[in-house]
Amino acid sequence: MIYDIRHLTRFDYGGTVEFARCNLRLKPVDWPGQRLEHYTLTVAPAGRLRPARAEAGVANVTRLVIDTPVRTLTIESRARVVVDRLVPVPAADDPTLAEVATLARASRDLSASGPAGYLYPSPLIPLDAAIRDYCLPDLDPGRGALEAGIALARRIQRDFTFDGSATIVTTTPAEAFAHRRGVCQDFAQIMIAGLRAAGLPAAYASGYIRTIPPPGRPRLVGADATHAWVLLWCGPARGWVGLDPTNGIWMAQDHVVMAVGRDYAEIAPVDGVVLGASAQDMQVSVDVAPVDEYAT
């Protein structure tokens, strides 16, 4: 499947911004099962762009510097991404969760995509006893890793209500868990907290989900915005397997990975420092359109 992705972010400031220095993580990464074919990034009315090093996680980072006074700022990202990723199928010879935990602790891969960095709590996803206990029934150490992962994702999808007004970006996993309501970020963080509590490497994936569903299929929750889901490392042979607790599905043809980190703070699409504005209003729109004539 080939997707054309347009990600538009507009800031309206309450006063004049004299200077801003921001990190943009809007360029999709190359990841198993997907390939970036083309990418453009534009900023208006002013701004200088240059590549920057990702300080954490797996991300393509662009540094934006604005040193001309502005009252509005529009950031437009366009990408064409080829996705060729099959739906994972649990198998009898999959490593068990106990084996995955042992392999992850023994791994010498200290890169940003290695399992070791995703075993432990992170600033936005601390360990929580209530979340641990909720997740434990699906995480028997002797259970196959893929079977257990999708079972937990589907239980979260059944037990929690998607409610865009229930949480904000700073809502903690414990708060969302207590209310059983939230958005994709909340559900991903809850699942990651449970997996890490069981000694398993779990990462936060930020990206996109297709806007237009195939004929006869319902529209997926999270379309028309950046989406978040979970990556569970399932041993060297299986690698990172994507699980979407918002929709109760695997990461496959419908998902495009933009960045991967321990939590949202490491891979936020836009962050930085703005000087001179008293307040700001941010509007984001996303369109993920399949290029049907090139579909595979």
Image: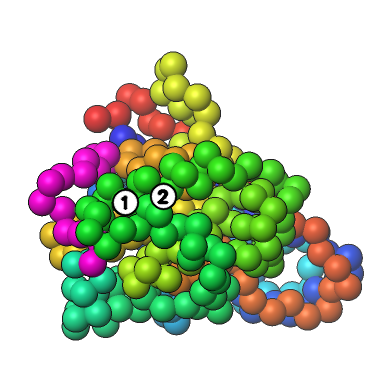
Q: Residue at x 35, y 58 (%)?
A: 139
Residue 51 image position (x, y, % from top left): 45, 74
Q: Residues within 10 Å of mark 1 (few under 14, many from 20)?
A: some
Quarter of the view holding residue 16: bottom right
Camera-side residue of 83 and 242: 242
What residue would you read off at disc 1? 148
Label number found at residue 152: 2
Q: Which range is magenta?
A: 85-98
281 lies left or right of 227: right
Q: Is residue 201 magenta?
A: no
Residue 239 image position (x, y, % from top left): 22, 60
Residue 137 image position (x, y, % from top left): 40, 54
Q: Residue at x 50, y 24 (%)?
A: 218
Q: Is residue 94 magenta?
A: yes
| Extreme residue toward the left, this view | 93
Amino acid type shown at disc 1: Ala
Instruction: Say above or below: 266 vs 177.
Output: below
Q: Are marks 2 and 1 in contact (CB under 8 Å)?
A: yes
Q: Secondary structure at mark 1?
A: helix
Q: Quadrant of the N terminus?
A: top left
243 lies left or right of 164: left
Q: Residue at x 59, y 45 (%)?
A: 160
Label number found at residue 251: none
Can the viewer see residue 209? Answer: no
Residue 88 image position (x, y, % from top left): 24, 43
